[in-house]
């Protein structure tokens, strides 16, 4: 896909009226029982994804990014306490059960980090790929197999008939992840939840799998929630990127602006902490302390304040709201003062 | 790459490893100077981890020699004394800090044991050195008395580094040692490793797939592909001006600002 079309689709995504949102998450708070105590993992998260839009969700461990995908796919563990609303195509997801939940899951597919942990090792690739088509959608076996073979071709697996008869252990990690993507797309979902889908892959394989995912989602107009710890990877394939910290969204920004003009000090800090392949830093700009999980954060102050080089007393006095600025959102009380200075400050 | 065999602290030549029919490592040679830092870069199956295991003594080479501190170590040690001697020369820090520490020992006990085995020092001397080591890697008094499960991934990796340093090795093998860490913690540990090298003169062999980390921590690099070294040179030169097609492809796959993923040849 050319640069021009990429830009066009991004523009149309920005112009899209709110009613066209495919997924709406409104003020989602999730608490989980851990070792006898109830801990919050998500704290008032709101986000929207338009039809065919790719939204990146970036964060470190414990930020809650994977819990977002699990919440949307109704895969939270038993005992989870959920407040807030998730709407898919204007319907409430929280109240779904039985047949309706299965129908919803055909429209929302998930791709995981480790394909081997999410595939039955004693069933063939063909069985795995056609299962949802046959049992949920009632597609006859021969037709399901034909569609699966066709989809394998689309993810660049040319000898698809042979692959359908193979077992997971016979495929490399990159091939298996492509087969997982093909399987996820078979039910023609409208939303793909991709949780670190390339983290376990080699870098050249990652580039390949990301290119395939990007191409297919544009061609088939599938919306994607792309979860990763890699800011640059998210920016490469997503229209907008949301950054999470301690169970909250701290920034939402057009991906093309995120690296060079971040709105939140945390985004600027993780971009600066990462070693740069194009130059050797005398010293890396490490962030002091360690990333907080949602339950460790003080709810009455900015969660990033203890590690933030820009934090003032006001940041420790109250928890900041998301503030709209320059077409983005930032959960920073000083966002207007720091506007345009965050990248600069890191370089100095 | 400069060949300074005379002052080399680690000298590897003609290293080969076969697993049955498969040639995992084929004719790998390099030398590492004191306080030098060399990266072995490659993807899965390149043979980079097998090279690391052979240097530490966890795999035996099919052919070739490994000489550390003037001592041949390509065959298994015949005595406990010889094994300890080798352990005092080369140590390794693994990728996963969650599985490489004894869950039943406190940080203090882990380091104390390493010092006792390696040096046989009396308790008070060991206690003093445990404090020094934990200070070098930035662990506080509470963390020193904690069990590994009470520590974060970055803190555990600091313990693993301190334990490796306990034997006062001349060479530290870093086998993807920062790959599993969050970006904010990874920067802390990379800075720490740079400081330790400056202060102690220890040499590093970094096994990594991450070219940005390689650039930050090493002076020289070997690029491995399917068991063979396909390119070598100063790290900045190889990354800025890769000459081999495989290195170019590897570099083109690294996400960076403005990067777009591209499909390669179909399989």
Image: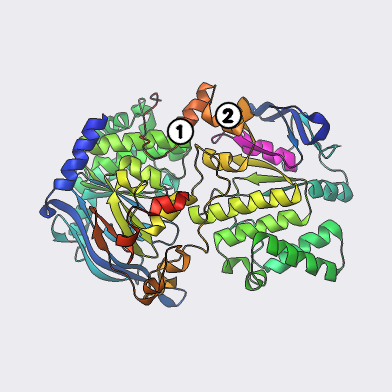
Q: Kindly tell me whether residue A273 is visible in this rendering.
A: yes
Image location (x, y in percent) of residue B105: 69, 67
The quadrant of the picture occupied by the N terminus of chain A is top left
Q: Name the residue under label 2.
A: B237
Q: In this view, does B247 lie to the left or right of A196?
A: right
Q: Is residue A172 left or right of residue A164?
A: right
Q: Is residue A128 left or right of residue A274?
A: left
Disc 2 crowd, CA 10 A, few/some/many (<14, 14-19, 20+): some
Residues at marks 1 and 2 on the same chain? no
Nearer to the camera, A32 or B264: B264
**At 32% from the left edge and 32% from the top edge, which residue is drawn?**
A155
Q: Does the magenta stretch include residue B39?
A: yes
Q: Is residue B183 above or below residue B52?
A: below
Label 2 is found on which chain of the structure?
Answer: B
Picture quadrant of residue B121: bottom right
Image location (x, y in percent) of residue A71: 30, 61
Nearer to the camera, A271 or B85: A271
**At 55% from the left edge and 41% from the top edge, which residue is drawn?**
A280
Disc 1 crowd, CA 10 A, few/some/many (<14, 14-19, 20+): many
Q: Residue A204 carries which label?
A: 1
**At 52% from the left edge and 40% from the top edge, which residue is drawn?**
B212
Secondary element at tag 1: helix
Start-end of magenta stretch: B35-56
Image location (x, y in percent) of residue A302: 38, 69
Q: Is residue A275 above or below residue A315?
A: above
Q: Is residue B9 magenta?
A: no
Kindly check if marks 1 and 2 are in contact, taking CB atoms under 8 A apart as contact: no
Secondary element at tag 2: helix
Nearer to the camera, A45 or B75: A45
Picture quadrant of residue B24: top right
Nearer to the camera, A106 or A11: A11
């Amino acid at each position: 896909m050319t640069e021009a079309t990429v830009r066009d689709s991004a523009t149309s995504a920005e112009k899209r009226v709110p009613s066209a949102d495919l997924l709406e998450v409104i003020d989602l708070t999730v608490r989980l029982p851990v070792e006898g105590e109830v801990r919050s993992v998500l704290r008032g998260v709101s986000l929207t994804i338009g039809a065919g839009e790719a939204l990146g969700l970036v964060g470190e461990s414990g930020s809650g990014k994977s819990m977002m995908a699990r919440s949307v796919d109704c895969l939270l563990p038993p005992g989870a306490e959920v407040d807030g609303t998730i709407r898919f195509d204007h319907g409430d997801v929280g109240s779904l059960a039985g047949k309706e939940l299965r129908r919803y899951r055909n429209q929302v597919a998930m791709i995981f980090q480790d394909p081997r942990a999410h595939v039955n090792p004693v069933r063939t690739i063909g069985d795995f790929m056609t299962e949802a088509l046959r049992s949920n959608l009632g597609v006859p076996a021969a037709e399901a197999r034909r569609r699966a073979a066709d989809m394998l071709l689309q993810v660049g697996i040319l000898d698809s008939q042979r692959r359908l008869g193979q077992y997971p252990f016979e495929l490399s990690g990159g091939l298996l992840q492509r087969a997982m993507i093909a399987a996820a797309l078979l039910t023609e979902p409208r939303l793909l939840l991709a949780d670190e889908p390339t983290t376990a892959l080699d870098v050249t394989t990652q580039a390949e799998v990301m290119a395939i995912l990007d191409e297919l989602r544009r061609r088939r107009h599938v919306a994607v929630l792309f979860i990763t710890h890699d800011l640059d990877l998210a920016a490469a394939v997503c229209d907008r990127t949301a950054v999470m910290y301690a169970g909250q969204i701290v920034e939402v920004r057009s991906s093309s602006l995120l690296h060079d003009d971040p709105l939140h000090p945390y985004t600027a800090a993780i971009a600066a902490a990462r070693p740069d392949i194009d130059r050797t830093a005398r010293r890396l700009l490490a962030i002091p302390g360690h990333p907080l999980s949602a339950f460790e954060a003080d709810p009455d102050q900015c969660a990033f304040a203890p590690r933030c080089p820009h934090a003032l007393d006001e940041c420790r006095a109250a928890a900041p709201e998301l503030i709209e600025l320059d077409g983005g959102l930032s959960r920073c009380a000083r966002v207007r003062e720091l506007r345009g200075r965050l990248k600069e400050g890191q370089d100095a | 790459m400069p060949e300074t065999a005379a002052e080399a602290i680690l000298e590897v030549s003609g290293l080969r490893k076969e697993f049955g029919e498969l040639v995992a490592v084929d004719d790998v040679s390099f030398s590492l100077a004191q306080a030098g830092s060399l990266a072995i870069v490659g993807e899965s199956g390149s043979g980079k981890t097998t090279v690391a295991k052979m240097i530490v003594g966890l795999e035996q080479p099919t052919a070739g020699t490994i000489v550390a501190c003037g001592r041949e170590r390509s065959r298994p040690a015949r005595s406990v004394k010889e094994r300890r001697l080798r352990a005092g020369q080369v140590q390794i820090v693994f990728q996963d800090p969650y599985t490489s520490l004894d869950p039943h020992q406190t940080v203090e006990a882990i380091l104390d044991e390493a010092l006792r085995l390696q040096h046989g020092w009396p308790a008070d001397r060991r206690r003093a050195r445990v404090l020094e080591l934990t200070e070098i890697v930035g662990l506080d008094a509470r963390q020193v008395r904690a069990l590994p499960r009470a520590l974060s991934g970055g803190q555990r990796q600091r313990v693993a580094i301190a334990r490796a340093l306990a034997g006062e090795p001349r060479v530290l093998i870093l086998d993807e040692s920062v790959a599993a860490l969050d970006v904010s913690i990874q920067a802390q540990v990379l800075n720490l490793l740079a400081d330790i090298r400056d202060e102690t003169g220890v040499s590093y062999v970094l096994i990594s797939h991450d070219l940005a980390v390689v650039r930050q921590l090493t002076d020289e690099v070997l690029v491995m592909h399917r068991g063979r070294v396909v390119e070598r040179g100063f790290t900045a030169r190889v990354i800025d001006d890769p000459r081999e097609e495989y290195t170019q492809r590897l570099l083109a796959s690294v996400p960076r600002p403005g990067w777009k993923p591209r499909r390669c040849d179909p399989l």
